Image: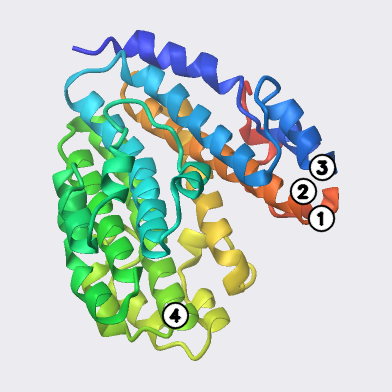
Amino acid sequence: MSNLDFIVAKVRGMRGNLYEGERLRRLCEFSSIEDLAARLAPHEPIGSAVALQRSLTARHVDELHRILRHLDGWEAEMLTWMLRRHQVENLKVLLRAWAAKAGEETLAAYTVELPPPLDLPMKKLAASASMEELVAAIPVERIKEGALLGLGDFEESGRLFFIEAGMDKAYLNELHNVAGQAAGDTRAHVLKLVMLELDIYNVMSVIRALFNYSIIFNKIRPFLAPFGASVAMNIVDDVRNAPDPDTAASLIPASLTGRHNRPLSANEVESAMWNTLYHVANRLYYTAVLDFGAVAAFHYVKRIELANLVRISECVRYGESGDTVRHKLMQLPATELVGV
């Protein structure tokens, strides 16, 4: 059985090393990727924003994997499945590289090195003779089943959209299933976080599919994840019937966006929803003192950190000013960064 006292204490120590608050904001002053990389990855030869992002993601996974080594039973299953999100992202890169007939160098540049049991036989998969053969060789059964949902559309249209959506749905279905197997306070804490992620995924999937890719809703419907606490089918119907993406964003409940005083544009709404999850995870991190909820909350706090670091690297890449970059970050008020 996992020693949660030890693990939660370990997580508390790790939180102090995250880039949050003023420590995060200071990174916005860097004017080149080389200087930013020298701060964030001083011992690695990094010459591009993509290489920096790959390094940051690999380190993010490795640090969470160190926690996994101390877990067993349901706790180990839960954190392992949380980390499988990065496996899914690597598979998406692999699918795109295969479809574009890109070489090993491109695949290596855009995929993240993952530790067992998250690593994949990338070269073997990339050598598949057909997309059907590649999908059939995905070694994680749940993810393979999700990919198969979109295979027919790929064979008809050459689009990867539905294979990727199928993998996302499969990942989130199992995330929800595993979270629901916990008991007591732990179950309530972990499901609260997971259900927020489900809500964010569902509304953003609908908005992107309809307004970015012009895909009709009833083709998207089978690829929605389980509903969370704030977004049920009536909200999805409102969003999908909106005339434009900004109107769709304004129909998302304020309980999810965190903005009660004004509607948000489509460009703002995803970050606002993740910022809501950041607030919830931060509160749970401090209140779920003696259960796995603190570890799950740390996972989401750390995921926000990674998203912020990637965003900073993108903004630096395109020469945006420090103030502009700071306004694009997901942040907590100083009063909520207790002990950080």
Q: Amino acid at mark 3?
A: Ser
Q: CA distance from mark 2 to mark 3?
A: 6 Å
Q: Where is the C terminus found, in terms of image quarters?
A: top right
The residue nearer to you, when weighing 228 against 260, is 228
The residue nearer to you, when weighing 81 against 49, is 49
Q: Amino acid at mark 2?
A: Val
Q: Residues within 10 Å of mark 2 (few under 14, many from 20)?
A: many
Q: Amino acid at mark 4?
A: Tyr
Q: Where residue 93 sits: x, y (%)?
A: 42, 53
Q: Where residue 185 sits: x, y (%)?
A: 26, 31
Q: CA distance from mark 4 to mark 1?
A: 28 Å
Which residue bears the numbered disc 1? 320
Q: CA distance from mark 1 to mark 2?
A: 6 Å
Q: Residue at x 43, y 33 (%)?
A: 113
Which residue bears the numbered disc 2? 316
Which residue bears the numbered disc 3? 32
Q: CA distance from mark 3 to mark 4?
A: 33 Å
Q: CA distance from mark 4 to mark 2?
A: 28 Å
